[in-house]
Image (cartoon, rainbow, N blue to C red):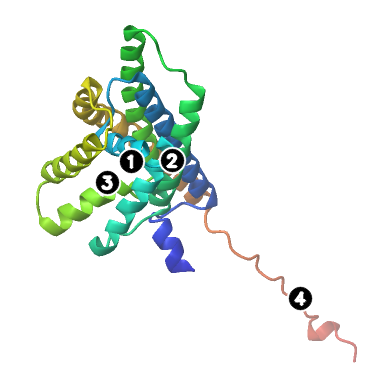
């Protein structure tokens, strides 16, 4: 049981409250990530490489975009096996929560009819996606399926991260485009805009996470170890007071 816990929670949590806070932040980030993907799709100006792939699959199979996203995550996780990558609870929740959140967003968000609204929605989706990425990565509960695929291939091949990422996303983009996935100016903006924005928001949420952990650690140390109360010893009467 301990080994399973260490696998799914690859952190040194500061108690149940800290673990709960981390998982809650993870789930909030994943939900916002799914909503940002829905905004990106609704903008109809092109989507990111992996979403081109998911939408291409959804064009040919009786499934929604969110379901296709979950299926793609499952396929990527299967590739983790020969790479010997270790998933965390964040990996599994990423695989199963982002897709339904995206479908919910598509159900709630109407498609814009004016170009200016499409552009505004595209920019907003990329900013929200970058914020959501910082929120769900900062708890350090395991990489997403696609990020784990990238780091696993980097470890095995020894190639640079940007080369592996370009090859992976280029392959997903090409296959998705051949399947009819939407490629447009939004795809280019996504490719060049998301990285720098994540570089701004991720350190911010990591600092907040570290500050929270420091406060919890300081509070735990100030309270000291909590152990069992010492047993009260029963006083025995002195010999002088004993009855003769």
Residue under numbered circle 3: 147
**Which quarter of the picture shows residue 204?**
top left
- From the top left corner, tell me how far across and down residue 59 is, in percent: 35, 36
The label nearer to you, 4 versus 3, is 3
Please say if the residues under marks 2 and 3 sit with CB atoms less than 8 Å apart. no
Q: Earlier in the sequence, mark 4 or mark 1?
A: 1
Residue under numbered circle 2: 63
Please say if the residues under marks 3 and 1 sit with CB atoms less than 8 Å apart. no
Question: Depth check: 6 or 179 in front?
Answer: 179
Residue 197 in view, yes or no: yes
Please say if the residues under marks 1 and 2 sit with CB atoms less than 8 Å apart. yes
Q: Residue at x 16, y 39 (%)?
A: 170
Give the Cα distance between marks 4 and 3. Answer: 63 Å
Q: Residue at x 40, y 47 (%)?
A: 95
- What secondary structure is found at the residue carrying circle 3? helix
Q: Earlier in the sequence, mark 2 or mark 3?
A: 2
Give the Cα distance between marks 3 and 1. Answer: 21 Å
Residue under numbered circle 4: 234
Please say if the residues under marks 4 and 1 sit with CB atoms less than 8 Å apart. no
Q: Is residue 83 left or right of residue 235?
A: left
The label nearer to you, 4 versus 2, is 2
Q: Earlier in the sequence, mark 4 or mark 2?
A: 2
Query: How many residues crowd mark 3 within 10 Å: few (<14), some (14–19), many (20+)?
Result: few
Question: Depth check: 222 or 3 in front?
Answer: 3
Assign the C terminus to one quadrant of the image.
bottom right
- From the top left corner, tell me how far across and down residue 35 is, in percent: 43, 29
- From the top left corner, tell me how far across and down residue 191 is, in percent: 20, 29
Query: How many residues crowd mark 4 within 10 Å: few (<14), some (14–19), many (20+)?
Result: few
Vertical relation: 58 (above or below) 73: above
Q: Residue at x 80, y 86 (%)?
A: 239
- What secondary structure is found at the residue carrying circle 1? helix
């Amino acid at each position: 049981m301990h080994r399973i816990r260490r696998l799914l929670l690859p952190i040194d949590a500061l108690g149940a409250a800290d673990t709960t806070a981390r998982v809650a932040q993870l789930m909030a980030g994943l939900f916002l990530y799914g909503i940002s993907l829905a905004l990106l799709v609704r903008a109809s100006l092109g989507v990111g490489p992996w979403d081109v792939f998911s939408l291409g699959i959804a064009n040919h199979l009786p499934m929604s975009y969110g379901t296709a996203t979950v299926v793609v995550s499952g396929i990527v996780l299967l590739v983790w096996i020969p790479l010997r990558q270790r998933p965390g609870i964040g990996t599994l929740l990423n695989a199963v929560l982002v897709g339904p959140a995206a479908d919910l967003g598509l159900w709630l968000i109407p498609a814009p009819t004016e170009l200016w609204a499409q552009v505004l929605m595209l920019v907003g989706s990329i900013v929200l996606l970058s914020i959501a990425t910082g929120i769900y990565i900062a708890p350090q509960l395991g990489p997403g399926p696609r990020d784990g695929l990238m780091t696993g291939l980097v470890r095995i091949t020894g190639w640079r991260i940007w080369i592996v990422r370009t090859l992976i996303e280029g392959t997903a983009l090409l296959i998705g485009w051949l399947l009819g996935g939407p490629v447009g100016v939004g795809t280019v903006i996504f490719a060049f805009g998301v990285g720098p924005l994540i570089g701004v928001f991720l350190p911010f949420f990591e600092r907040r996470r570290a500050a929270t952990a420091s406060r919890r650690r300081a509070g735990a140390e100030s309270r000291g170890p909590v152990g069992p109360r010492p047993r009260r010893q029963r006083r025995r009467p002195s010999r002088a007071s004993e009855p003769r």
